[in-house]
Amino acid sequence: MSPQPLVIVGAGGFARETVELVHAINAVSPTWDLRGVLDDSPTLEGGTVAGLPVLGPTAAVHDLVDAAVVVCIGNPSNFVARAQVVERLGLAADRWATLVHPSAVIASTATIGPGSVLHALCVTTTDVTIGAHVAVMPSVVLTHDVVVEDFATFGAGVMVAGSTRVRTGAYVGSGVILREGLTVGQWSLVGAGSTVVRDVPPGEVWVGAPARRLRDVERVGDLADRLA
Ligand SMILES: CC(C)(COP(=O)(O)OP(=O)(O)OC[C@H]1O[C@@H](n2cnc3c(N)ncnc32)[C@H](O)[C@@H]1OP(=O)(O)O)[C@@H](O)C(=O)NCCC(=O)NCCS
């Protein structure tokens, strides 16, 4: 089968990391014809990102009808952006690419939703469920019966113990440890290096070891209700 056309939405760090991920997949087996990136920043128009052309604004996905799409945007200061763009683009589920680095160890019992990206050296042990448009940075370990809902994000090196649930849109910072059986609430953020030993309510920022509430999250607005 010939490689399938693919475009990446976004032009920042996560997008450039995912370009490398796609190159790694193609080095094993030519799977994707990576055409370029889409971004709404006028300063990027006509330029290149990670050696790929900027093909146009995000809305150009509607012209590139034969291309699979993955949205690679979002950072700790605006981690709702990915969900907002996915919602605005409104593509059918079969347009979204699911990308898993060839070095990831994914159990046969895992399910991974459309638009999700799992970077190098991630592990799912058994019976792990990952929703749609989830971003998983390198070396994240998701152990037995972990459930990750849509639009969640994991920084590098997160360790999630068994049966923990990371709810819609939650952001789990780099190096976080989540104890077994916990829930991290919708659109909450756990700061880098924290150790979480109690449930994190929705819409809050928690930090430290053991993690404690720091403040409410910003920017979520009515997104939480619409995407719950
Ligand atoms: C949690 C976070 C969002 C807080 O950012 P912020 O609201 O700008 O907070 P500040 O930096 O002003 O810090 C506020 C207080 O929380 C503490 N704090 C902030 N982040 C912390 C963390 N990760 N662990 C422990 N304490 C932390 C600060 O020391 C400060 O304490 P003080 O008031 O006693 O001095 C941020 O520090 C963080 O961890 N972001 C995630 C980073 C990450 O994982 N990136 C991955 C990139 S892919």
Image (cartoon, rainbow, N blue to C red):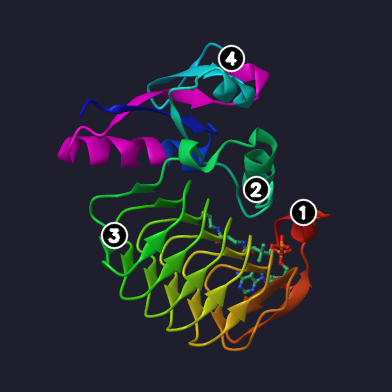
Q: Relative to 128, is 172 on the left or the right?
A: right
Region of the chain picked out in magenta, as a range: 18-44
Q: Nearer the viewer, residue 17 or 163?
A: 163
Residues packed near mark 4 inside 10 Å, few (<14), some (14 to 19) or many (20 plus): some
Amino acid under label 1? Answer: Leu
Q: Which residue is mark 2?
A: 83
Q: Which residue is mark 1?
A: 223
**Residue depth check, mark 1 versus mark 4: number of the one nearer the observer:** 1
**Residue depth check, mark 2 versus mark 4: number of the one nearer the observer:** 2
Q: Give SS at disc 3.
A: loop
* Residue 215 pos. (x, y %): 79, 71
> Does 198 lie within the magenta span?
no
User: Going from the N terminus, do you reach mark 1 or mark 2 first?
Assistant: 2
Residues packed near mark 1 inside 10 Å, few (<14), some (14 to 19) or many (20 plus): some
Q: Which residue is mark 4?
A: 45
User: Going from the N terminus, do you reach mark 2 or mark 4 first?
Assistant: 4
Q: Give SS at disc 4.
A: loop
Give me the residue at 43% from left, 26% from top.
67
Rounded to the nearest angstrom, the CA distance separating label 3 from label 1 is 31 Å
Q: Which residue is mark 3?
A: 121
Q: Give SS at disc 2.
A: helix
